[in-house]
Amino acid sequence: MKWTEVEEIAIQLSEAHPEIDPTRVNFVDLMNWVLALPEFDDDPAHCGERILEAIQQAWIDEVA
């Protein structure tokens, strides 16, 4: 899984962290959680604020 797979990342984050409210996640934690996903395999340097915002929004949409 790569940074561009925003929807899949959001699904996996919602499954890995069901107790977390994605509206309250800071970007440092979000990035670390994405990097810790078992299927994630991309360069951390390719991540930026826009990608993290998109992941966070997709996660919010996933649990809504």
Image (cartoon, rainbow, N blue to C red):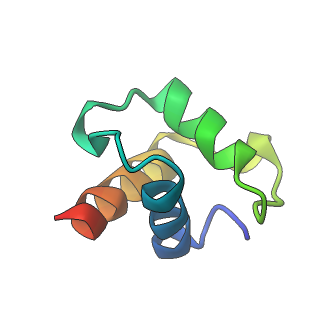
Residue drawn 29% across the image and 68% down it = 62
The relative height of residue 6 versus residue 19 in the rendered view (above or below) is below
Q: Position of residue 4 (x, y in %)?
A: 60, 69
The relative height of residue 23 versus residue 13 in the rendered view (above or below) is above
Q: Position of residue 23 (x, y in %)?
A: 23, 40
Residue drawn 64% across the image and 34% down it = 32
- The residue at the far front in this view is 19
Check the picture and name the quadrant holding the N terminus: bottom right
Residue drawn 16% across the image and 64% down it = 64
Q: Position of residue 13 (x, y in %)?
A: 50, 55
Report which quarter residue 9 is drawn in. Answer: bottom right
Residue drawn 35% across the image and 41% down it = 19
Q: Position of residue 61 (x, y in %)?
A: 23, 66
Is 52 displayed left or right of 36 in the figure? left
The relative height of residue 35 versus residue 58 in the rendered view (above or below) is above
- The residue at the far left in this view is 64
| Total number of numbered discs in the rendering | 0
Residue 28 or 47: which is nearer the viewer? Answer: 28
Is 38 displayed left or right of 25 in the figure? right
Residue 33 or 3: which is nearer the viewer? Answer: 33
Report which quarter residue 40 is drawn in. Answer: bottom right
Residue 33 or 15: which is nearer the viewer? Answer: 15
Residue 20 or 9: which is nearer the viewer? Answer: 20
